[in-house]
Amino acid sequence: MTIRVTTLPNGLRVATDTMPDVQSVSLGCWVGVGTRNETAAVNGVAHLVEHMLFKGTERRSAYRISEEIENVGGQLNAYTTREQTAYYAKVLHEDTALALDIIADMLQHSKLDEDELVRERTVVLQEIGQSVDTPDDIIFDHFQSTAYPGQSLGRPVLGSADIVGALPRSALVEYIDGHYSAPGIVLAAAGRLEHDRLVEMALKSFGNLSGKLVPEGEGARYVGGDYREARDLEQMHLVLGFDGVGVHDPDYYAHSVLSTLLGGGMSSRLFQEVREKRGLVYSIYTFTGGYRDGGLFGVYAGTGEDEVTELVPVVCDELVKVAEDVTEDEVMRAAAQLKAGTLMALESTMSRCEQLGQQLLVYNRPVPVEEIVTKINAVDRDAVVRVAKRLRASRPTVAALGPIDRLESYDRIAARLA
């Protein structure tokens, strides 16, 4: 595995992971801005920009963008998160220049046509409506907004229907001009390619991109609290979470190991206790979210109205017990799962490309897989216990949607976790 990084004169970084034994290349631009770089008045603009960059440039119509990439059997896509926006493609290695030209064209020369904006706003409004109608999706937005109330980090990536439906073209132009500059962008690629050749192409494609620095988004201030919404559903959807750790925290990997052993697979504590032994749920799992200056740890469960009264005490008990009786064997099994996932991802050009782009945005350097494995191996029982206690020291966040009448009060849940 050969990773190289070159910084262009304007600050854009070109990072490659050469895989000579494959026939494809995955490449894309990872932009270090997302929802937390928006103001409340334009919440959703980052995601709407992502959509609009596919809707035509000075050289290509929206149809032509799709046609050119699919003419060579390639794939083109994008996504927006709270801290990043990515535009990426996967093609055969001989079509690398085409994929790069399309992505560079989209990022720098999109027309943002008014008629296209009217149509695409409607598309995004449909996406928002679909999310609202999907309880096991929208519950995470409620959880996020309760954990980080009144903050950019707590607002939904899609935005609200009222704001998105009224966003003018000028808001998109202002957002792009203020945030899409070279120092905040990583061009990452993995597969059968030559680093120096990609740098040459990047100089031609991105050499004129602005080199101004992008201001950081609003800082994270975890608060926690209670959100409940009664809705006529078959199941109650519950997320219970805590103030987690950021990506630069020394306990970041211990945090991940804890999440895995609690709710990361069929052998995890919550899956075994809640689903296998008691049959209280179909779906239960834990998750983590790491940001540059904070993070979240949470448990999701979907359960019937009659099972709610038993579910919550059991989940709380498991969150308390893990700091008391976790074993080294459990820690080793969870660590093995994390290592396996990390190493298996190396077989995919797309996974390696995405990992490279994200690492440069987050850590300002590629992180060798050996370093990651070493840090996972260093997690022991004491580290997991420390993290488990640290989580429960924070004010919990509860978000519930559905038949909530039998859900315990917030104070009662907090008391169980104390």
Image (tube, rainbow, N blue to C red):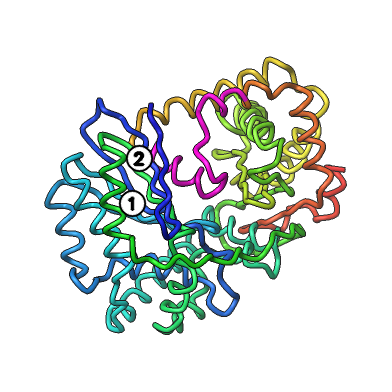
Foreground of the two, 386 or 299: 386
For residue 323: magenta? no
The residue drawn where x is 87% and y is 43% is 418
Instruction: Identify the mark nearer the N-term, 1 or 2.
Output: 1
Q: Report the disc number at residue 350.
A: 2
> Relative to the observer, which residue lies in front, 233 or 336?
336
Residue 228 visible in this rendered orientation of the protein: no
In percent of width and height, residue 51 lies at 36, 67
Q: Quadrant of residue 245?
A: top right
- What amino acid type should be assigned to the residue bearing mark 2? Met
Total numbered labels: 2
Q: CA distance from mark 1 to mark 2?
A: 9 Å
- Within 10 Å of the Cα at label 1, are there few (<14), some (14-19), or many (20+) other Cα atoms? many
Kindly identify the residue that appears in the image at 75 percent across and 33 percent down: 318
Is-magenta flag for residue 353?
Answer: yes
Q: Which residues are magenta?
A: 352-374
Alpha-carbon neighbours of circle 2 within 10 Å: few (<14), some, or many (≥20)?
Answer: many
Disc 1 marks which residue? Answer: 88
Residue 66 location (% of width, % of height): 20, 59
- Classify the position of the N terminus by image quarter: top left
Q: Position of residue 338 (x, y in %)?
A: 55, 27
* Residue 282 makes an appearance in the image: yes
User: Circle 1 — which element?
Assistant: strand
